[in-house]
Amino acid sequence: MRLPIAEGGAGAPGPAGAPAASSGKPPVTAHSHFGAFAWSTLAYNVAVILWGALVRATGSGAGCGGHWPLCNGEVLPNVSQIATVIELTHRVMSGIALLLVAAMFLWARRAFVAHHAARRWAGWSLVFILTEALLGASLVLLGHVARNESVGRVYSLATHLMNTFLLLASLALTAWYSPQETRPARSRKDRTFSLSAAGSLVVLVLVAIAGVITALGDTLFPSHTLVEGMRADFSSTASFLIRLRIIHPFLAVGAGFVVALAAFPEYRARHTARLRALSGWLLVLFAAQFAVGATSILLQAPLPIQLLHLLLADSLWIVLVLFTAERGAYRAGSLDS
């Protein structure tokens, strides 16, 4: 009778039944390959998001007209205009992202047992990439692109952003849990995100929504100097997009304190290496985000700074999601012990 061997276990018997020599390196397993693919899929989706910000910042959202999924009513449109090239590239990148997430979902179903966290979050990733596509299409079909400054566009962008954050969270958790063995269900207290632990996540989402409004206002109503921008912030005749953008810096400072209150004690406590690393990255990313945000205000939001600001925001969100999940798992384990 052949005994079962743990996947990737050290000292697995060789062909003759003798223990195999250990190379000192961690074994490469199917889960390792899946994890690498999941992290790559997450990174690619961040790139798609950054390109989407380029679409908004350059006013290229109407580069394919009011048509979707066709571009200017054609499968192979005329790409003589740069706006069409930028928008069409974004659509192609989004289509590839959908295929990657779908492949990850199918792979997860084959690689992991039912109820495994990676398999569950891969399923949510597929749900949110589909809703992401639908929300992107609605922006075009509703005309919430280019120079549109309506309240409806603000609601559309806020909804789009929340879905994007849910997508990034699902992708990150899929990759994070992929190396781990499945665990039996614990008590109701064992939840990845409790209401108290998710408070910092909600705060960060609010900051991001305010950031979307700020970025849209900067795009539609650019200021050439800091003084001109501050004067517009308090002008009664300015667009509501300009008057609302002053909220973003104050929310960002408040969010920084909330996250620091959660991350700094965990960093000092040294409960686990993973939790300490995540809390350290949270503090570093928030400091960098504050510096880039201040630079953006002083320089009146040049495009490279906008993209860097968004990249840091996405990175901060991903790390905060993983930090919240890891802290929840540690506390649940402490209750069980």
Image: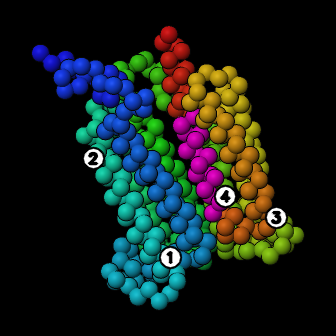
Mark sitting on residue 298: 3
Distance in Å between CA atoms under marks 4 and 1: 20 Å
Q: Which residues are magenta?
A: 307-323
Distance in Å between CA atoms under marks 2 and 4: 34 Å
Mark sitting on residue 86: 1
Mark 2 sits on what residue? 106
Mark positioned earlier in the residue sequence (2 or 4)? 2
Mark positioned earlier in the residue sequence (3 or 2)? 2
150 or 157: nearer the eye?
157
Mark positioned earlier in the residue sequence (3 or 4)? 3
Magenta highlight on residue 325: no
Q: Position of residue 267 (x, y in %)?
A: 68, 28
Mark sitting on residue 309: 4
Amino acid type indicated by mark 4: His
Q: Is residue 255 visible?
A: no
Quadrant where the image shows the N terminus: top left
Mark positioned earlier in the residue sequence (4 or 1)? 1
Mark positioned earlier in the residue sequence (1 or 3)? 1
